[in-house]
Image (tube, rainbow, N blue to C red):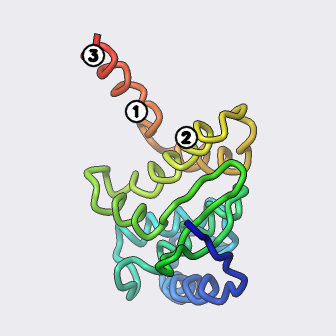
C-alpha cells in the first residue's frame, strides 16, 4: 500500500477551531491551552462527549484532534492511503492507524463515556510498544499523556487487557 504524506495541516487547525469556539462556551473546564496536541485536548474531547459536542458530523473534528495528540507524542506522521483515507503511519517500524475508524470504534464501544478516548489512547500506546518491541521508555511522551488520563480512573485499559489475556490463557490450556 502506498501512503502519501500530508504536508498541508490546515485541516487540523479547522478542527481545533471548531472545538475551541465551543470551548469558549464552557466556563468550568479549566483548560487554558487547547489545540496543542497535549493531554488537555483529550480531556476536552472526553468532556464534550459527556456534555454534548459541537456540530461534528461523524466525529471528524474530534478524530483529528485525538489523532493530533498521537502524532505530537509519537513518531507517527499524517498521511493518506490509496483511497484517500486519513492515516497515521510510520515507516520504521511499519505501523498504520486509520484514526477515523479507531475513534468510531471507541465511541461506539461499551467502554464508559469517560474511558473512551483514554482507553483508545492507551491501546495505541500498547500497540506501538508491541509493534516496535522497544523498551517502555521509547514512547515517554505518549506514556505521560496516558498517565495523566489514568489519574482519575478506577481501572486502565492495560489492566482490563491483562485480566482478559490471563483468562484466555487459562481457557486455552
Q: Are marks 2 and 3 in contact (CB under 8 Å)?
A: no
Q: Using the rendered view, name the quadrant where residue 155 is placed.
A: top left
Left or right? Give the position of 137 relative to 83.
Answer: right
Which numbered disc, 3 or 1, marks the residue that appears first in the sequence? 1
**Closer to the camera, 62 or 154?**
62
Q: Position of residue 143 (x, y in %)?
A: 65, 44
Q: Position of residue 77 (x, y in %)?
A: 68, 66
Which numbered disc, 1 or 2, marks the residue that appears first in the sequence? 2
Image vertical order of residue 101 relative to residue 125, above or below: below
- The residue at 50%/81% (across/down) is 84
Query: The C terminus appears in which quarter of the rendering?
Result: top left
Residue designated by label 1? 161
- The residue at 66%/34% (across/down) is 133
Q: Position of residue 93 (x, y in %)?
A: 68, 48
Which numbered disc, 2 or 3, marks the residue that appears first in the sequence? 2
Query: The N terminus appears in which quarter of the rendering?
Result: bottom right
Residue designated by label 3? 172
Left or right? Give the position of 81 relative to 35.
Answer: left
Amino acid at each position: 500500500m502506498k501512503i502519501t504524506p500530508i504536508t498541508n495541516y490546515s485541516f487540523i487547525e479547522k478542527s481545533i477551531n471548531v472545538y475551541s469556539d465551543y470551548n469558549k462556551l464552557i466556563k468550568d473546564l479549566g483548560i487554558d491551552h487547547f489545540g496543542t496536541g497535549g493531554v488537555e485536548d483529550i480531556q476536552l474531547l472526553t468532556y464534550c462527549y459527556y456534555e454534548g459536542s459541537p456540530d461534528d458530523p461523524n466525529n471528524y473534528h474530534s478524530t483529528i484532534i485525538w489523532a493530533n495528540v498521537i502524532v505530537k507524542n509519537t513518531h507517527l506522521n499524517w498521511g493518506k492511503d490509496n483511497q484517500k483515507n486519513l492515516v497515521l503511519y510510520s515507516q520504521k517500524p511499519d505501523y498504520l492507524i486509520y484514526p477515523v475508524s479507531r475513534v468510531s470504534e471507541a465511541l461506539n464501544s461499551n467502554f464508559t463515556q469517560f474511558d473512551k478516548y483514554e482507553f483508545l489512547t492507551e491501546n495505541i500506546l500498547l500497540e506501538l510498544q508491541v509493534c516496535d518491541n522497544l523498551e517502555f521508555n521509547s514512547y515517554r511522551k505518549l506514556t505521560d499523556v496516558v498517565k495523566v488520563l489514568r489519574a482519575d480512573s478506577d481501572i486502565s485499559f492495560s489492566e482490563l487487557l491483562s485480566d482478559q489475556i490471563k483468562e484466555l490463557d487459562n481457557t486455552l490450556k
